[in-house]
Each structure stands twice: as C-alpha cells, then as structure tokens.
C-alpha cells in the first residue's frame, strides 16, 4: 500500500515537470477529491436484520441461562455437602476430644498411683494364689488399656478422614462459586446485548432536521407528553423500572420542557430524601442509557447530580447549586427531548 501511494504522489509531479498541464490539473484534482471524500460509514442495520440478530441472541441467551441454572444446582449441592462434612467433622472432633481426655486421665493415674508392671509382680516371695490373682487383674487392666488405645486410634483416624472430607467439600464449593459467577456474568452480558438490539428497533417519531435537531411535537394523551417523550419514558420503564414514580407534565411555566410535555423526572427516592447507593447507581444507568441513545431518540439533554449533559456539546457540565436534593437533581435524572 505504501508503494502504491508513493506512485500516486509522484505522477502529478512528473506530469507537471513534463509540461503536461492538463494531465497535471487532472491528477491534482483527483488527489484533492480523494482527500476530501469522507470515509463511508457502515450502513445502519434494518429492522429485519435487528430482529434476526435478536433471535440468535435469544437462543444463545437461553443456552447461557440453562448453564447458569445447572451451575446453581451444582453450587447448592456443594453447599449441602460442605455443611454435612462440617457437621460430621464437628461430631468426630467431639468424640476425639473425649477419648483424648480419658487417655490422658488414665496415663496420669498410672503415673501417680505407681501401679506395678507385669515384671514387678514376678519379683519377690509371694503367695502363688495371690500372685495369680494379681496377674489376672493386671492382665484385665492391660486389656482395657489396649482396647482404649485401639478405640482412640480409630477415633483419631475417623477425625482425620472427616477433616479431609470437609476440606475437599470446601474446595469443591469454592470451585462452584467461581463457575457460577462466570456463567452469571456471561448470561448478564448476553441479556445486555439483547437489550441493546431492542433499543435499536426504536427510533424517535417525527422529523429530524439536517443539523440533528428535531421538529417540535404537540403533547397528547392523558399524560400530556409528546410521542418522543412517551417513547423514551416507555423504554426506560421497561429497561430499568422506576419504583418511586415518573413525573412529566406540569403546568408551572418555569422556562423548561415540563410544561411543553417534553421532559420527565425519573425519581430515585420519595419526599426529597437522598437516594440509597443502589438507587444512585440506577440513576447513573438511566443517564448513561439516555446519553448513549440520545441522537437516535431525539433526547436533547440530561440533568443528574447537579450536572447537565447536552447532545450538542457532549460531556457533563457542573450546574450552580439550587439548594436541596431535588432542586439539584440528586434524587432523579431529568431527561428532555426535542
């Protein structure tokens, strides 16, 4: 490509140098036209194309949601298994602690009492009957001690197995958490793609001027808002939900678009209260959506958190303090359309 470009640049120079004025003029004009020609924008998808994309996205979404559901089941199963393993370990630990205490008590008793061992019994001049009786008693004690030691070993091993099982189940549970989050994230991204395609199916009603502005519309319907504002309101309600209400038309002439039916406030709290962190995020999302779709839906400007964004200038600009959460638009994004 670089070589070809160099050749194009050299041709008019050679033509001019050779005195071929006509060839020079044509070549230079061609270069100017090429430089001035804007890059061709990709054609906008048609409604038919968007609907076809939506069908494909929906199928992929259903598959991802199914995988997410199965992952949830596996996670719940792992949670139950881990809980059972912990309970089993707690029971084994209790038995182990009891046996350990008994064994220590036996060892202390033997040490303090100075009980003779088997070889001590054979030493000295003792009555045979007494000797046999004491030997039998000693053997009985030895058997009991050996049984206790065997029981302790079994309890200790059982505790070790329960501990290992609990560790395995905890590791398995941790693995399902990661898998569950990954599948959830994939499904959420796919759903966002579907929402974006649905947004693109709608365009603002009315006539758009060459400069990007729109011809005004008359308010209509029971809520006294324009068709453009009604579309924006409908899409936001469907996409985000607004549990604290939406205020649009009001008769007070304040110089804004509310009396013209071209503005709506999407409330994030009631009674002028400052919204929660979750509701503030909802306000951020509504504002971002409005900005993203502004040119296509005829949105003129957005006000939120004492800032204003205008479609012509772009970027947020800080506004003067009007006093209070509502006056400064901290408890609601305000959206105005042309």
Image: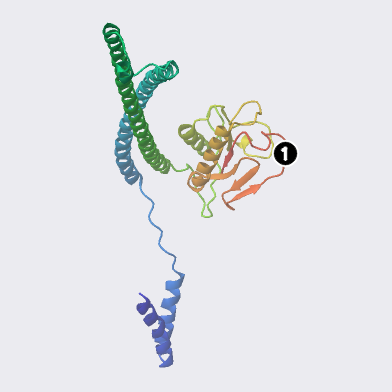
Q: Percent x, y for residue 201? A: 40, 42
Which quadrant does the C terminus fall into?
Answer: top right
Label 1 environment density (alpha carbons within 10 Å; few <14, some 14–19, many ≥20): few
- Give SS at disc 1: loop
Q: Indicate left or right for 171 with 261 as reference.
A: left
Render colour scheme: rainbow
Q: Percent x, y for residue 206? A: 49, 43
Which quadrant does the N terminus fall into?
Answer: bottom left
**Splitting the image into 4 quarters, where does residue 12 fall?**
bottom left
Q: Percent x, y for residue 153? A: 31, 24
**Splitting the image into 4 quarters, where does residue 4 fall?**
bottom left
Q: Residue at x 38, y 80 (%)?
A: 8
Residue placed most toward the observer, 61 or 204: 61
Q: Indicate left or right for 280 with 72 as reference.
A: right
Residue placed most toward the observer, 79 or 40: 79
Q: Count the marks: how many?
A: 1
Residue placed most toward the observer, 261 or 127: 127
Q: Residue lying farthest top?
A: 129
Residue named by callout 1: 322
Image position of 36 with respect to 318: above or below: below
Q: Residue at x 28, y 14 (%)?
A: 139
**Splitting the image into 4 quarters, where does residue 179 fall?**
top left
Q: Percent x, y for residue 57? A: 32, 41
Q: Indicate left or right for 107 with 236 as reference.
A: left
Image position of 320 with respect to 168: above or below: below
Q: Residue lying farthest bottom?
A: 18
Residue placed most toward the observer, 315 or 257: 315
Q: Residue lying farthest front?
A: 125
């Amino acid at each position: 490509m670089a070589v070809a470009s160099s050749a194009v640049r050299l041709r008019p120079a050679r033509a001019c140098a050779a005195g071929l004025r006509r060839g020079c003029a044509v070549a230079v004009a061609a270069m100017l036209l090429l430089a001035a020609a804007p890059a061709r924008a990709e054609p906008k998808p048609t409604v038919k194309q968007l609907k076809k994309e939506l069908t494909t996205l929906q199928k992929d979404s259903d598959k991802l949601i199914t995988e997410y559901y199965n992952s949830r089941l596996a996670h719940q199963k792992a949670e139950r298994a881990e809980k059972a393993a912990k309970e089993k370990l707690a029971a084994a630990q209790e038995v182990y602690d009891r046996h350990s205490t008994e064994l220590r008590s036996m060892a202390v008793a033997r040490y303090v009492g100075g009980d003779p061992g088997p070889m001590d019994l054979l030493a000295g001049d003792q009555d045979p009957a007494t000797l046999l009786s004491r030997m039998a008693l000693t053997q009985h004690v030895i058997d009991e001690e050996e049984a206790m030691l065997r029981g302790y070993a079994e309890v200790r091993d059982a505790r070790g197995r329960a501990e290992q099982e609990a560790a395995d189940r905890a590791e398995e549970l941790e693995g399902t958490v990661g898998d569950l989050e990954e599948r959830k994230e994939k499904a959420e991204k796919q759903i966002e793609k579907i929402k974006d395609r649905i947004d693109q199916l709608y365009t603002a009603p009315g006539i758009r001027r060459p400069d990007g502005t729109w011809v005004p519309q008359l308010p209509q319907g029971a809520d006294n808002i324009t068709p453009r504002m009604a579309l924006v309101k409908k899409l936001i309600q469907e996409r985000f939900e607004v549990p604290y209400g939406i205020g649009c038309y009001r008769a007070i002439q304040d110089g804004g678009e509310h009396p013209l039916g071209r503005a709506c406030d999407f409330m994030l709290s009631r009674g002028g209260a400052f919204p929660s962190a979750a509701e503030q995020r909802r306000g951020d999302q509504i504002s971002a959506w409005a900005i993203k779709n502004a040119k296509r839906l005829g949105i003129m400007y957005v006000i939120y958190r004492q800032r204003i964004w205008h479609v012509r200038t772009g970027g947020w600009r800080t506004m003067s303090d009007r006093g209070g959460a509502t006056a400064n638009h901290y408890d609601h994004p305000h959206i105005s359309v042309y």
